[in-house]
Amino acid sequence: MTTKLIKWLTVLSLFISVPVAVVAQAEEKPPSPGPDYVWEEAYLEEDGNVVAPGFWRLQTHEGFEWVAGRTDAEGRYIPGHWHSLELKPDKMWIPGYWAHNQWIAGRWRVKVRTGFRWIPGHWTRRGIWVGGHWHPVKALTGQVWVPGHWSRRGTWVPGHWRPVRKRGLVWVPGHFNRHGIWIGGRWVKTRRGQVWVPGHFNRQGGHWRPIRRRGHIWIRGHYNRFGVWVPGHWRRGRR
């Protein structure tokens, strides 16, 4: 065998061995936490891209059934999760859902709360997701109800009343940032000659804009006839 042929075979063997090593590494998994656990394989796209890594989970969870991870009709990945099978006379199960590029796990809520009514989760006209929450039946003069929300740590932050207005301040509604983390509503100082533009679900909160711009008119954010959100913007023209 010639020296040139030996070199060529050596190079070829390197190219062949690399994929084998990668596959072997991808199939490795950490030790099982115990005999009651089962391994959930990683979820891969058609091109082999890992959407969700594999993990260990309990084989059974009393009162729940395991729903395997999958993609929905819009191509979004819904992580594997436990779904309640129980029927609790004083509580109601709220299924998990997608909101602002993150999966919100299902939870229990009480069926009845004195002085409140349950508002199901919904999208506003501005494309902002409002999670299901309790809303007071009676309104308070000069006050606005701020719905409760789930904190970054997974705990429920109760809703509360706030003044309709505060001198020198503007209310910035709670919203999800681009990382899918909820930022609670807050008061911020007004800016002279500026007005606050509320954020949209695919933006990182809202932003300030001039009250007026010479030779332009402000077009509010809206959905066009194709159902696509058009952010607020300036357009040449007169009022």
Image (tube, rainbow, N blue to C red):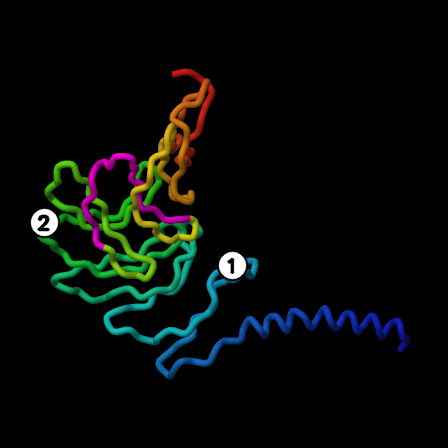
Tell me what residue is drawn at x 22 percent, y 59 percent. 93
Horizontal relation, residue 140 to residue 25: left or right: left
Residue 143: quarter of image: top left
- Residue 153: percent from left, percent from top: 32, 62
Residue at x 34% of width, y 58% of height: 152
Q: CA distance from mark 1 to mark 2?
A: 48 Å
Q: Residue at x 34, y 35 (%)?
A: 190
Q: Label 1 neighbourhood size at 10 Å, few (<14), some (14-19), many (20+)?
A: few
- Magenta part of the chain: 158-177
Front position in the image: 161 or 168? 168
Pointer 1 residue: 45
Q: In the depicted view, which residue is nearer to us: 178 or 184? A: 184
User: Where 195 sits versus 95, above or below?
Assistant: above
Judge whether 34 appears above or below 26 on screen. Answer: below
Q: Nearer the viewer, residue 216 or 91?
A: 216
For the residues bearing labels 1 and 2, Cβ distance under 8 angstroms = no
Specify whether residue 167 is painted magenta: yes
Q: Is residue 109 left or right of residue 195?
A: left
Q: Residue 30's mark?
A: none
Q: Is residue 40 magenta?
A: no
User: Residue 30: x, y in percent?
Assistant: 48, 77
Q: Quadrant where the C terminus lies?
A: top left
Q: Position of residue 70 (x, y in %)?
A: 41, 59
Give the amino acid type for the residue marked by disc 2 in the picture: Gly
Q: In the figure, 19 relative to 135: above or below?
A: below
The dot on residue 115 is 2
For label 2, the crowd category at 10 Å Cα-Cα, with few meaning under 14, some 14 to 19 and many 20 or more, is: few
Point out residue 137 in the picture as x, y percentages from the top left corner: 11, 44
Q: Secondary structure at mark 1?
A: loop
